[in-house]
C-alpha cells in the first residue's frame, strides 16, 4: 500500500470515527450494554475461528523470532478467550459513566452548577502483540461513549481481526454504528505515523506495548498521549516482613506470568531481613527456574548470576529478575526513584509506619503492601478490563477503565440570572 493510499485510508477511518463519536455521545446506556453482551456471545461462538487465526499469528511470530515472552503475549487458548468474554460482560454490567454527576453546587449568584462526565471523543489505540487488547479497548471505549480506532501489531493481525469481527457483530445487534469500533486493516507502519498526526480526528492516543513503541509515540505524536511506560516493577522485602507472606508474594510476582507489565523485575531485600532469614527469597526463585542477577552479597549465593549495571531498570519480561540488598525502606525508595518506571511497586512488611513511608515517598501509579504486583490489572481492580496502565500524571493514572476514558463538562443553570 502506497503512502498516499495509507493517508487516504486513515483519513476515511478518522472521518467515520468522528461521525460515530457524535452518535455515541448521546447513545442510551442500554444499547451500549446490549452491544457488549452480544459481542461476548459472538466471541464465545467464534472460538474455533479465533484460535485458527491465532495459529496463523503464532506461526508468523515464530518465523520473526519473537521472544518466548512475546509469544506468550500473542498466544490465545480457550481460557484466554473465556477471560475476554468475561471482560466484555463485566464492562457491560458496569454503571455507565457518561452523564454521571461528579459534583454539583449552588452559587450566591443564583447559579446551579454541575460537573458531569462526557466522552473524550475518538480514541486511537496502538498496541503490539496482545490480541486481547482488541476486545478490552473496544469494550471500554464503547462503554465510555467513545469511538475507537484500533491499530494492533503485525504479529496479532489475524487474531485481532477475528476478535474485531465479534465486536462488529455486537454493534450490529444493538443497531449502533459499525464505525464506532474500527480496526486499521493493514500492517503498513505508515498507518501508525498517520494516526499520530490526526489531530482533527483523534482526541487521544493510547500506546500499549514495549519501550520502543511508547517512546516512538511520545516523541512523534501531535495528538495527546496517555503515557503507558514499561513495567519495571519492584518488590521490597522489609526487615519487618512476614517470611511466609514474603515468599509467597515474591514467587507469584515474578513467575505467575513473566510477559505482562505487572511482573516483578527487581527484588530489593532489606539487610535486616537478610540477616534474619538469609537467602530464602533468592533460593526460592532459583528453585522455580528464575535467573537471579544479583549484586553485592547476594551475588555470593550459589546459582545466581552477577548483575550488570543495566540489569537494574530493565524490563526482562522473562524468567529473570535483578536483586540487591538495600539499607531499609529509605534505601528501597532511593533505588526505585532512580530505576523505576512509575508503574507498580510492592512493599512486604508488617510495620505500618514503614508501609506509610513507602506509600508517601513514592509516586508510582500503583503502590501495594503485602500483595503481588501481578494484581496491577484493570480486571483485578474491578474495572472489568483495562486499556492499559497509565504511568503519566495527567488525566488518568494506573489501570485505565471506562471511567478514565471520560472528561467532563459543566452544566450551569440560572433563572434569568445576570452578572453584576
Image (cartoon, helix red, strand yellow):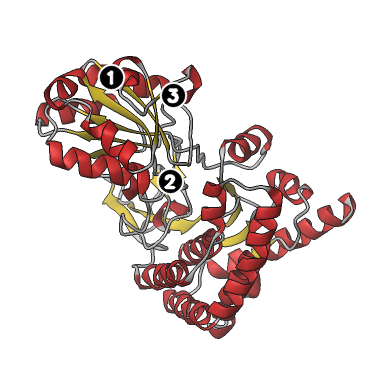
Relative to 66, residue 241 above or below: above
Please state, as top left, top right, bottom left or bottom right, where the C terminus lies in the image. top left
Element on which disc 3 rests? loop
Disc ID at residue 357:
none
How far apart are the alpha carbons under marks 2 and 1?
A: 23 Å
How far apart are the alpha carbons under marks 3 and 2?
A: 17 Å
Left or right, 420 with respect to 76, comes to left
Do the numbered discs 1 and 3 sit on residues whose CB atoms are within 8 Å? no
Circle 1 Cα neighbour tier, 10 Å, few/some/many (<14 / 14–19 / ≥20): many
Residue 409: image x %, image y %?
A: 45, 52
In-front residue for pair 226/381: 381
Q: How many marks?
A: 3
In-front residue for pair 258/184: 258
Element on which disc 2 rests? loop
Which residue corresponds to mark 1? 325
The answer to which of marks 2 and 1 sits earlier in the sequence is: 2
Circle 3 Cα neighbour tier, 10 Å, few/some/many (<14 / 14–19 / ≥20): many
Disc ID at residue 312:
3
Please state, as top left, top right, bottom left or bottom right, where the N terminus lies in the image. bottom right
The answer to which of marks 3 and 2 sits earlier in the sequence is: 2
- Which residue is drawn at the image coordinates 49% and 37% (left, top)? 230
**Residue 327 showing in the rendered view:** yes
In-front residue for pair 57/37: 57
Residue 47: image x %, image y %?
A: 53, 78
- Which residue is drawn at the image coordinates 32% and 25% (left, top)? 302
Element on which disc 1 rests? strand
Disc ID at residue 258:
2
Looking at this view, name the residue that lies furthest to the front.
Answer: 302
Residue 208: image x %, image y %?
A: 55, 47
Left or right, 76 with respect to 91, comes to right
- Which residue is drawn at the image coordinates 24% and 33% (left, top)? 281
Amino acid at each position: 500500500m502506497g503512502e498516499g493510499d495509507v493517508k487516504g485510508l486513515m483519513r476515511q477511518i478518522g472521518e467515520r470515527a468522528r461521525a460515530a463519536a457524535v452518535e455515541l455521545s448521546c447513545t442510551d446506556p442500554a444499547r451500549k450494554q446490549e452491544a457488549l453482551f452480544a459481542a461476548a456471545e459472538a466471541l464465545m461462538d467464534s472460538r474455533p475461528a479465533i484460535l485458527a487465526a491465532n495459529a496463523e499469528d503464532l506461526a508468523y511470530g515464530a518465523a520473526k523470532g519473537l521472544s518466548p515472552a512475546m509469544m506468550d503475549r500473542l498466544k490465545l487458548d480457550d481460557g484466554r478467550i473465556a477471560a475476554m468474554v468475561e471482560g466484555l460482560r463485566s464492562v457491560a454490567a458496569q454503571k455507565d459513566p457518561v452523564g454521571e454527576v461528579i459534583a454539583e453546587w449552588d452559587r450566591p449568584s443564583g447559579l446551579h452548577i454541575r460537573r458531569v462526565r462526557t466522552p473524550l471523543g475518538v480514541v486511537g489505540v496502538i498496541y503490539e502483540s496482545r490480541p486481547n487488547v482488541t476486545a478490552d479497548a473496544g469494550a471500554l471505549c464503547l462503554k465510555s461513549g467513545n469511538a475507537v480506532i484500533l491499530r494492533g501489531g503485525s504479529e496479532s493481525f489475524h487474531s485481532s481481526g477475528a476478535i474485531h469481527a465479534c465486536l462488529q457483530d455486537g454493534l450490529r445487534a444493538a443497531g449502533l454504528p459499525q464505525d464506532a469500533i474500527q480496526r486499521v486493516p493493514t500492517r503498513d507502519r505508515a498507518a501508525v505515523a498517520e494516526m499520530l498526526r490526526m489531530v482533527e480526528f483523534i482526541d487521544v492516543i493510547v500506546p500499549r506495548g514495549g519501550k520502543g513503541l511508547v517512546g516512538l509515540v511520545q516523541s512523534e505524536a501531535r495528538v495527546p498521549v496517555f503515557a503507558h511506560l514499561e513495567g519495571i516493577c519492584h518488590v521490597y522485602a522489609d526487615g519487618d516482613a512476614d517470611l511466609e507472606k514474603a515468599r509467597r508474594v515474591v514467587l507469584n510476582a515474578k513467575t505467575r506470568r513473566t510477559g505482562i507489565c505487572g511482573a516483578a523485575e527487581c527484588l530489593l531485600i532489606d539487610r535486616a531481613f537478610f540477616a534474619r532469614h538469609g537467602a530464602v527469597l533468592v533460593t526460592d526463585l532459583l528453585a522455580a527456574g528464575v535467573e537471579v542477577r544479583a549484586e553485592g552479597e547476594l551475588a555470593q549465593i550459589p546459582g545466581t548470576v552477577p548483575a550488570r549495571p543495566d540489569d537494574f531498570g530493565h524490563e526482562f519480561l522473562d524468567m529473570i529478575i535483578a536483586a540487591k540488598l538495600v539499607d531499609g525502606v529509605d534505601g528501597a525508595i532511593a533505588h526505585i526513584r532512580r530505576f523505576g518506571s512509575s508503574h507498580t511497586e510492592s512493599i512486604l512488611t508488617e510495620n505500618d509506619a514503614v508501609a506509610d513511608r513507602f506509600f508517601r515517598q513514592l509516586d508510582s501509579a500503583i503502590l501495594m503492601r503485602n500483595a503481588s504486583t501481578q494484581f496491577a490489572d484493570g480486571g483485578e481492580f474491578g474495572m472489568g478490563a483495562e486499556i492499559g496502565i497509565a504511568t503519566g500524571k495527567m488525566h488518568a493514572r494506573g489501570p485505565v477503565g471506562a471511567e478514565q476514558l471520560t472528561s467532563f463538562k459543566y452544566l450551569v443553570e440560572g433563572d434569568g440570572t445576570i452578572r453584576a
